Image (cartoon, helix red, strand yellow):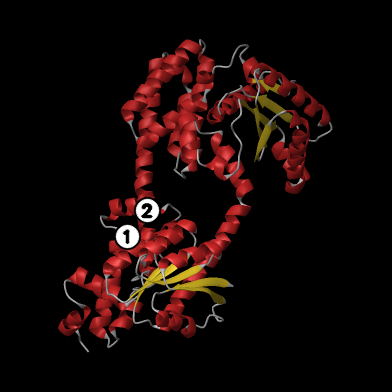
Amino acid sequence: MKKVMIVDDNYLSAEGIVKNIDWDSLDAEVVHIEYSGDTAINSMKITPVDLIISDIEMPNLDGISMSSLALAINPLVKIILISAYDKFEYAKRAIRLGVCDYIEKPLDYAYLSEKIRNAFSTIDREHRNMELVNQSRPLMTEKFFTDLLHYSGKDAAAYLGRYPGYLNLKLDYGYFNTIKFEIENASQMEAELGITQYQMELFNIMDLMREKYGIFDQIYFVKEFNGIICVLAQNTSNPNHFLQSIHKVISSLLDDLSDSPLSLNIGIGTIVDNIWNLHLSYESASHALKYRFFSPNKNIFDAKEALGQEFSLLSFSESKEEELIRLLCQKNTQAIEEWLHSFFQELSQKYPTKNILFIRIYSLLGRILKFLYELNIDTADLEEEIISVYTRFDLFQTYEQFFEWMNRLCILVCQKLDTSLQTYHNQLCKLALSYIKENFEDNALCLGDIAKHVNVSPAYLSALYKKVRGTSISDTITSLRIDSACQYLTNSNLSLKDISLRCGYANQYYFSNSFKKKLGMSPSAYREQHSGI
């Protein structure tokens, strides 16, 4: 049952609301009737409420100021403000503040009941969504670590910095390490065991890891289709001892899994001293696993040992490739050319043989194609070009020749991205406009609903729509509503109140104000000039 507070310095007005609303049918009860904004705030602190219905014009603390304090105490409380004055400024201030609704006196109790019902529906929806958010916290935690493994230092801190506190994650440890458990026969085992049994085998590995890793301060998991990523945290004065302990525990773990049907390979990343640099540890663990090709009899691969020396994060860091992807997205051809110059210069210094160069560049091309796949961009011509080049790789006699080809390929990628982005933007705005046309008669239609329908953020949709169509979403809605109103005024005898409701306006005042602002005359004057009835 919803709890309601009535606030009005006029005793009769407050009693009128209490007695003329069927609270039982709304599954609600009035728990407070207050005659000033100050006492309303005090009562709210003692007994929280779901909805406040308040007059605006009150001495000392008016309804607007009281609403601001109430929302500071409980941001989820819904507030309906009532005014005896036809002042549009009140409505604008209330909306900016976050008030649920604004109604003018004299009160239409049926209309007020409907507004209360709408407010309660919003409360129920928010409670359901809050419950879903709470239930999804484990998934959000795993998503946090998944993103953390793929964002570089400053980007990770900027993008994810607010989440540790929200998810109650303790991350202020001295050192961190990433361990990548890769199931070599993942596809085969899933087919033989079935999805359920295969997933149970993965959970079994995680359970054993939790038992073994009790000597460390913290452990987190990210489960993938073909393996598990483990993030370890430790406060220690000796990071080398941390690494030695990891090796010892992993060896013990493999002994316990000797009878498992899963073929397990383990990559141990480098130790990092900052959680926001965890991607470096992950990249090095992933790179260490690539040495499985050269050591088929081994199961554990340490990034430090992979090159016989301290692992060079710069040499094989996937963040370098991500930098190129960002430049391609920006279509910054000059910066792309500079990046390629640096890339090929580094290759010429580090890889003395042509075959290794072949593998490294092929890996980079694969990353570019993967990026385009994820955007659903047709890459058939690019793939054909790459295959053609690699079948006649010997024709390239110098790094410069390969550089020129790579640069032309990147320019083609930029052109594909530009074409795809324009098409996507146009389709997105077309979809938004279609939704607006279907729903503009709903007075509850808002930017958030439209953005949710097209699956982008409200801020992004608002800016994109204005850029593509040359007008704002709010102006589009207003134009459709006014055009519809003109049709009703011209071809029907409906009252202005009925027309306003049919055209998506909460009340006649907003309708008249918008109509006059748009067409320079009142609805009544327009009807006199254009009516065909």
Could you say which is closer to the camera, residue 479 or residue 55?
Answer: 55
* Residue plotted at (38% across, 45% down): 420
* Residue plotted at (25% across, 70% down): 514
Could you say which is closer to the camera, residue 163 or residue 387?
Answer: 163
- Would you say the residues marked 1 and 2 are in contact, meaning their CB atoms lie under 8 Å apart? yes
Q: In which quarter of the image is residue 107?
A: bottom left
Query: Taking 523 as reference, is 354 left or right?
Result: right
Q: Name the residue under label 2.
A: 461
* Residue plotted at (37% across, 60% down): 97
Q: Where is residue 462 in the image (x, y as percent from the top left)?
A: 34, 54
State which quarter of the image contains the C terminus: bottom left
Q: Is residue 134 above or below residue 509?
A: above
Query: Taking 307 as reference, is 426 left or right?
Result: left
* Residue plotted at (67% across, 37% down): 226
Q: In this view, does 280 lie above or below 80?
A: above
Residue 432 visible? The answer is: yes
Give whichever of discs 1 and 2 has the lower sequence position: 2
Distance CA(mark 1)–CA(mark 2): 9 Å
Q: Position of residue 334 (x, y in %)?
A: 31, 27
Q: Around disc 2, counting alpha carbons within 10 Å, would you say few (fewer than 14), some (14 to 19), or many (20 or more)?
A: many
Could you say which is closer to the camera, residue 212 or residue 353?
Answer: 212
Q: Around disc 1, counting alpha carbons within 10 Å, would you say few (fewer than 14), some (14 to 19), or many (20 or more)?
A: many
Could you say which is closer to the camera, residue 351 or residue 282?
Answer: 282
Name which residue type carries label 1: Ile
What mark, if any, has residue 473 been given in the picture?
Answer: 1
Q: In which quarter of the image is residue 245?
A: top right
Name which residue type carries label 2: Leu
Q: What element carries label 1?
A: helix
Q: Where is residue 383 in the image (x, y as percent from the top left)?
A: 47, 34
